[in-house]
Amino acid sequence: MDTPVETVEAEDVEIFASDDPGKGLPGRVSLPGYSRTMGPQTHLNEERDRLQGLTWEHFDVRQLSSTVGAELIGLDLTQELAQSVFDEIQQALWDYKVIFFRNQLLTPEQHVTFARRFGELEIHPFLPPNTATPELVRFEKNDTAAGYENQWHHDVTWRKEPSRGAILRAVEVPPVGGDTLFADAYAAYGGLTEETKELIAGLEATHDFLRAFARQVPKEKRDEIRERYPIVHHPVVINHYQTGKPLLYVNRIFVTGIKGWEQEQSYELLDLLCREFEVLEYSCRFQWEPNSIAFWDNQAVQHYATSDYSPHRRVMERASIKGTQPTRH
């Protein structure tokens, strides 16, 4: 027997709109009383369209978002690859800012060998290594060591010459959660108002390893380690080492202030700038599987590792490629 369908009479409501609410608005608009804006991020259009037009000889590409992130499909990184393949991978990294590979059954030694094709590797003094391979930092999260990398950051900006890039391999992943997000630092700069760009032109930020790693340094060795890794100052806006394009280069994890500014003023400005990396249109999100690899340009993107899987295990290993001192825009 069919169930009768109940009819509902339309309410007596006068409809005032004939067009979509966005029609005729002049781009991004502010919400009264708040500092954030809403609306189309039209400054992404040129880069989005450029990336859509790229073609590749040695692999296929699946873009993850408008201007950042792409999976490279059709490569087996365990095999010998021609230099032309490495050159194209490097170009893809510069274009997409972060690239991903799936189902790559690399050993730690193969991981290091692959990373070395892109430059000399660095050893991190404040993170534990893979015991057999010191070039690989090992992030082993479990019920006693939760994730604290869930804040947007470039890696090791406390170095005078921060990493150029990093290659992270998933050894063991939790049943759900533990994704990593990447944000386009070019887009973050491009989204700033002209007044803010003028304000930060020429400013330098102060970077200090103790802000994140003080617990890792024995008190009796602090002076010795400080001499080895002194406080450094990097421009707030830098030119990318290869593309020459300007990008935003500050983060909350390692930056302690703006050089020459009072602390309260520094934090107000830094918080304003760091919030640009939280704009979702500038980011992509990568869901890990065992033997997945992320290779990111450590100037062009910031990253954020979600911490939503404790007490499950998440084990990752990372090789970092030495870089050069960031240059002023």
Image: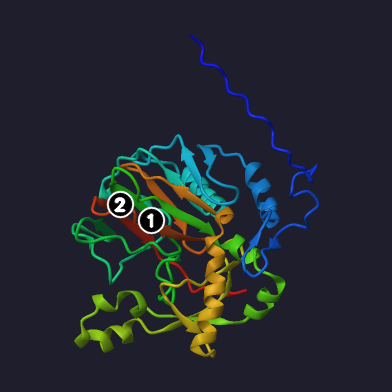
Residue at 66% of width from left, 80% of height from top? 199
Which numbered marker is on residue 309?
2
Residue with the mark numbered 1: 306
- Secondary structure, mark 2, is loop
Asked whether the viewer can see residue 277, the reply is yes
Residue at 30% of width from left, 51% of height from top? 309
Amino acid at dot 2: Tyr
Residue 234, image x, y percentages: 51, 78
Q: Going by the image, does 121 lie left or right of 232?
A: left
Please tell me in which quadrant of the rendered image residue 6 appears: top right
Report how many numbered discs are placed on residues in the image.
2
Q: Going by the image, does 189 lie left or right of 3?
A: right
Q: Report the coloring of the rendering.
A: rainbow
Residue 181, image x, y percentages: 45, 54
Residue 249, image x, y percentages: 53, 70
- The C terminus lies in which quarter of the figure? bottom right
Q: CA distance from mark 2 to mark 1?
A: 8 Å
Which residue is at the front of the view, 14 or 286? 14
- In the image, residue 283 sits, relative to residue 54, either above or below, namely below
Which residue is at the front of the view, 312 or 168? 312
Contact, CB < 8 Å: mark 2 with mark 1? yes
